[in-house]
Amino acid sequence: MAAVVWTVLMAAMTGAEGQSLGKRLALVKVLGEDSAEPIGVRRGLLRWLAHLADFASCFVGWLLPLGDPKRQTLADKIMRTIAVDLSERRPPPGC
C-alpha cells in the first residue's frame, strides 16, 4: 500500500510542479509540449498510467527517445509532454 501511495504522490508532484523527487535530483522537468508549463495533477497521474503502454510494447516505448528528435517515450507522445534537461541551463561551477 505504501508503494502505491508513494507512486501516486510522485506522479502528482510531476504534474503539479513538473518534477518528482527523482526528476529534481536528475535535473529533469516534465512540461506540456504545447504550453511549456507543468501539466497538472490529473494529467500527471494519467501520464504515469500511460507508462503502462511503454511496458505493454515490450519496452519499445522506453527505447523511443533514442531515435526521437524530442526524446519522448510512448507515454510522452500519448500525453503530449516533453522532458526538459535543466542541467544545461545551470552555469558551470565557479562562474
Image (cartoon, helix red, strand yellow):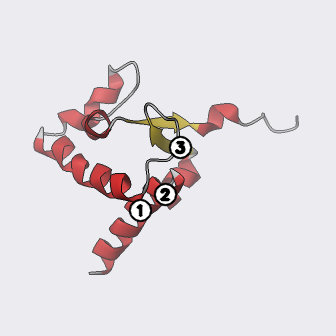
Of marks 1 and 3, which one's residue comes earlier in the chain? Answer: 1
**Hey, which residue is sitting farthest front in the picture?**
35
The image quarter containing residue 2 is bottom left
Residue 4 position in % (x across, y down): 28, 73
> For this view, does 78 lie left or right of residue 55?
right
Mark 1 near mark 2, Cβ–Cβ under 8 Å? yes
> For this view, does 85 lie left or right of residue 55?
right
What residue is shown with label 1? 12
**Relative to 5, does residue 36 appear above or below in the rendering?**
above
What residue is shown with label 2? 16
Amino acid type at image mark 1:
Ala
Secondary element at tag 3: strand
**Hey, which residue is sitting farthest bottom in the picture?**
1
Amino acid type at image mark 2:
Ala
What residue is shown with label 3? 28
> For this view, does 53 lie left or right of residue 19?
left
Distance, label 1 to label 2, CA atoms, is 6 Å
Residue 71 position in % (x across, y down): 39, 27
Q: Between residues 84 and 62, which one lies in front from this camera angle?
A: 84
Query: Around disc 3, counting alpha carbons within 10 Å, would you say few (fewer than 14), some (14 to 19), or many (20 or more)?
Result: some
Residue sitting at 50 percent across and 47 percent down?
38
